Amino acid sequence: AQSVTQLGSHVSVSEGALVLLRCNYSSSVPPYLFWYVQYPNQGLQLLLKYTTGATLVKGINGFEAEFKKSETSFHLTKPSAHMSDAAEYFCAVSAGVAGRRALTFGSGTRLQVQP
Amino acid sequence: NAGVTQTPKFQVLKTGQSMTLQCAQDMNHNSMYWYRQDPGMGLRLIYYSASEGTTDKGEVPNGYNVSRLNKREFSLRLESAAPSQTSVYFCASSRGLRAEKLFFGSGTQLSVL
């Protein structure tokens, strides 16, 4: 079985501040992990993904995430928030042999960026 | 440059009515998916099709049926709509099931009264 828990349904930061969105996963096999972003009235877009290899992955728009197996975590960070980062962010996991399983999404974290 | 196209964008149904949500992709992807999005619950997988000719249940398949008509098209049918099926529905596709990037449509907002 696979599952994802996102801690905090709403996060508010000031423009220029660090963004930290938390994600913990559960998987009985090595997972493939993803972060997606959803802007208002749009579908989801991939920010970044971890499959194998380097545990620190960089994505679009200055975001990055680190896979920590010992903590079963895949937290999303950005050093300096921009107003345009305001959106909903979803962590997702795909497990099974070589990731051969459809994605399971977390419940999402809505990021607000204050001027 | 269409990507994943869903129709309709909005729909209002009465309880017990039926309808089909259409989805088509033009990226020659093998795998297609239907998700529903509800506040505070993220996206939940209804059904998916790993490749043409196959379909599998996801987390919340009850009350839905799907058809993978061909490689491009994957439809979702509500045979007898219920208020609990009020949601935003997203179709997505990917090259394959194996950890591939999903491409999403813009969603269908469905209300069942």
Image: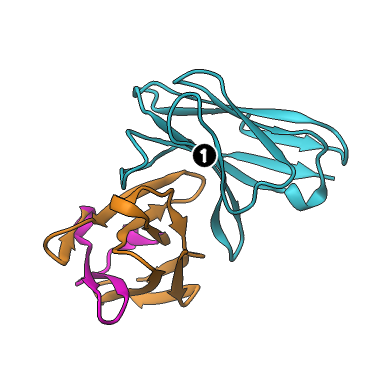
Chain colours: A orange, B cyan
**Where is mark 1, residue-wise?**
B48
User: In which quadrant will I find the C terminus of chain A?
Assistant: bottom left
- Left or right relative to A33: residue A64: left
- Left or right relative to B111: residue A6: left
| Residue A94, x across and y down, in percent | 37, 55
| Residue A92, x across and y down, in percent | 40, 59
Q: Secondary structure at mark 1?
A: strand
Residue found 11% across the figure and 63% down from its top: A54
| Residue A63, x across and y down, in percent | 22, 62
Chain under disc 1: B
Residue found 51% across the figure and 30% down from its top: B54
Farthest residue, direction top: B70
- Front position in the image: A55 or B108: A55
Residue type (three-letter) at the residue carrying disc 1: Tyr
Q: Is residue A64 magenta?
A: yes
- Left or right relative to B89: residue A42: left
Q: How many marks?
A: 1
The picture quadrant where one finds residue A24 is bottom left
- Front position in the image: B7 or A98: A98
Q: Is residue A10 magenta?
A: no
Residue found 47% across the figure and 64% down from its top: A1
Q: Which residues are magenta?
A: A60-88
| Residue B110, x across and y down, in percent | 70, 41
- Front position in the image: A115 or B61: B61
Vertical side of B82 occupied by B9: above or below: above
- Front position in the image: B64 or B53: B53
| Callout 1 crowding tier (Cα within 10 Å): few <14, some 14–19, many ≥20 | many
Vertical side of B110 occupied by A69: above or below: below
Farthest residue, direction left: A54
